[in-house]
């Protein structure tokens, strides 16, 4: 069911980080070692070292799924992997004789020179292609290559002595150090144009994906979940009272783990974003709000990414699933039908904006209900109302990117907006005639995301507007109050 499981996760990030960092450096390469005429005893010793390294590596990756290390940052993770790689390298070197080691070191030096030459050639071609007109000298190309290599090798831990300087900021400093004034000015201009082009392209993608998500979520809620809940009710009578309590505990664990996973995903995907295009920022903020407000529903609908839904080992949930596997299998035909119909309906929605494979090809892969989905089916709580009141976010018209939720409001509402710089902000509530009903804020605010909790109890049931003003920049957001 690969079309149902293309979901980003921390595990994929960790694997990518691991593969990237362990492919660098001057460590003993097994392919090169094979050319050194090792004895059978040496080969066996190398295999033992590799196996030991693999087991230790598995332990590091497994620890990422535990509560203890879930919040481990990339620098600490990189340090652990780096230490493990160095440990393996030292062990391999000890296996070689002095003559073999001398031969190997000469081979490594030769390969490093070849690699540097290839990478330098690649950099020159990239600069000529991406930054036409800069025309760097040979000396500048070598200096740029060497400085960027140093930054790349230490960038995961601490790119500069000053921790306030980011990796990207240090990269720009390197270009400034290597290029002359004319070249650097041209570099900055091209970078600005590239950034604008990327933002324009990203805005187009957000405008495509948001309507798809807005249509997919209600379809899943109105069609899929009720059918899965009906089938789950058929199973309920066959579950013992003791196991029902255990399942409740597993549900609670899964929810806590998912909340952490979702927040981390939101942080990784959105918090670093700071675009110059206000319309793009409004769409990004809207998408983030949409995910936050529908977190409970996503935890059910995002079922295929089950790896992230258990803070500890999922073996207890799997054991419970195996205990009731015969009963679940008796419902498999109906479960498969609901899944296949969901895919058909989803493909129609997605195909409005994106090309999708023929539905027959997708369905040909859905021949059984995987055991992981059976586990999540067992944990589905039919007593909980997962109905989705899709928030009617108003993305705002004007210079700021802002949203308001819930809309309409009954008693309370959250107004969210982003400031591009430190500035004085006035936030007002206007009625339909444009009369100022209330001034919520008139004060200096810092750059970044701002949220105002608004009590709407004293407002009549009608249409209103929020007006956000910073200097000459004004944004209007429409909202309504119901009683």
Image (cartoon, rainbow, N blue to C red):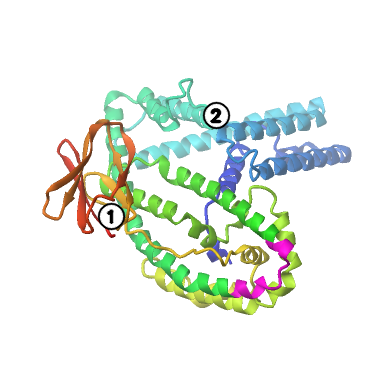
Q: Nearer the viewer, residue 182 or 64?
A: 64
Q: Residue 137 placed where, x, y %?
A: 37, 28
Q: Is residue 306 left or right of residue 264?
A: right
Q: Residue at x 61, y 73 (%)?
A: 233
Q: Which mark is residue 157?
A: 2
- Residue farthest right in this picture: 41
- Residue farthest top in this picture: 161
Q: Nearer the viewer, residue 51 or 148?
A: 51
Please identify the quarter of the rendering in which residue 277 is found.
Answer: top left
Q: Nearer the viewer, residue 123 or 326?
A: 326
Q: Is residue 281 left or right of residue 101?
A: left
Tell which circle, 1 or 2, labels the residue nearer the N-terminal end: 2
Magenta-tinted stretch = 231-244
Residue highlighted by disc 1: 394
Q: Residue at x 65, y 76 (%)?
A: 332
Q: Where, quadrant-wise, is the N terminus in this rendering?
A: bottom right
Q: Where, quadrant-wise, is the C terminus in this rendering?
A: bottom left
Q: Disc 1 or disc 2, which is closer to the eye?
A: 1
Q: What predominant SS class does the magenta segment belong to?
A: helix
């Amino acid at each position: 069911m690969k079309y149902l499981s293309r979901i980003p996760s921390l595990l994929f990030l960790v694997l990518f980080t691991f593969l990237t960092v362990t492919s660098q450096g001057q460590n003993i390469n097994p392919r090169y070692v094979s050319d050194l005429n090792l004895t059978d005893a040496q080969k066996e010793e190398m295999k033992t070292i590799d196996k030991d390294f693999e087991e230790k590596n598995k332990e590091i990756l497994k620890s990422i799924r535990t509560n203890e290390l879930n919040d481990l940052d990339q620098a600490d993770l990189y340090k652990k992997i780096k230490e493990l790689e160095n440990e393996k390298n030292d062990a391999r070197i000890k296996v070689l004789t002095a003559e073999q080691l001398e031969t190997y070191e000469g081979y490594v030096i030769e390969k490093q020179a070849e690699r540097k030459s290839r990478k330098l050639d690649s950099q020159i071609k990239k600069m000529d292609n991406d930054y036409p007109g800069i025309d760097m000298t040979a000396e500048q190309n070598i200096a740029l290559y060497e400085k960027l290599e140093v930054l790349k090798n230490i960038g995961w831990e601490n790119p500069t002595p000053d921790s306030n300087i980011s990796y990207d900021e240090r990269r720009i400093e390197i270009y400034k150090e290597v290029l002359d004034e004319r070249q650097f000015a041209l570099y900055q201009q091209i970078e600005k144009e590239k950034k604008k082009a990327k933002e324009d392209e990203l805005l187009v993608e957000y405008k495509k994906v948001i309507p798809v998500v807005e249509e997919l979520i209600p379809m899943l809620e109105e069609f899929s979940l009720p059918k899965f809940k009906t089938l789950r009710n058929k199973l309920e009578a066959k579950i013992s009272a003791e196991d029902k309590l255990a399942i409740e505990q597993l549900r609670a664990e899964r929810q806590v783990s998912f909340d952490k996973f979702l927040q981390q995903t939101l942080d990784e995907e959105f918090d670093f974003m700071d675009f110059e295009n206000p319309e793009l920022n409004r769409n990004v903020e809207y998408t983030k709000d949409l995910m936050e407000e529908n977190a409970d529903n996503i935890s059910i609908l995002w079922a295929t990414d089950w790896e992230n839904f258990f803070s500890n080992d999922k073996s207890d949930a799997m054991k419970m699933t195996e205990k009731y596997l015969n009963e679940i299998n008796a419902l498999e035909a109906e479960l498969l039908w609901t899944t296949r119909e969901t895919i058909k309906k989803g493909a129609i929605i997605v195909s409005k904006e994106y090309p999708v494979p023929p539905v027959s090809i997708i369905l040909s892969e859905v021949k059984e209900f995987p055991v992981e989905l059976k586990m999540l089916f067992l944990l589905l709580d039919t007593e909980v109302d997962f109905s989705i009141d899709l928030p009617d976010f108003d993305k705002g018209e004007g210079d700021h990117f802002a949203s308001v939720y819930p809309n309409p409001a009954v008693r309370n509402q959250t107004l969210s907006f982003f400031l591009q710089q430190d500035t004085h902000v006035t936030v007002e509530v206007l009625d339909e005639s444009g009369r100022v009903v209330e001034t919520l804020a008139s004060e200096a605010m810092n750059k970044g995301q701002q949220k105002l909790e608004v009590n709407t109890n004293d407002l009549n049931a009608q249409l209103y507007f929020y007006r956000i003003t910073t200097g000459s920049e004004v944004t209007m957001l429409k909202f309504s109050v119901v009683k």
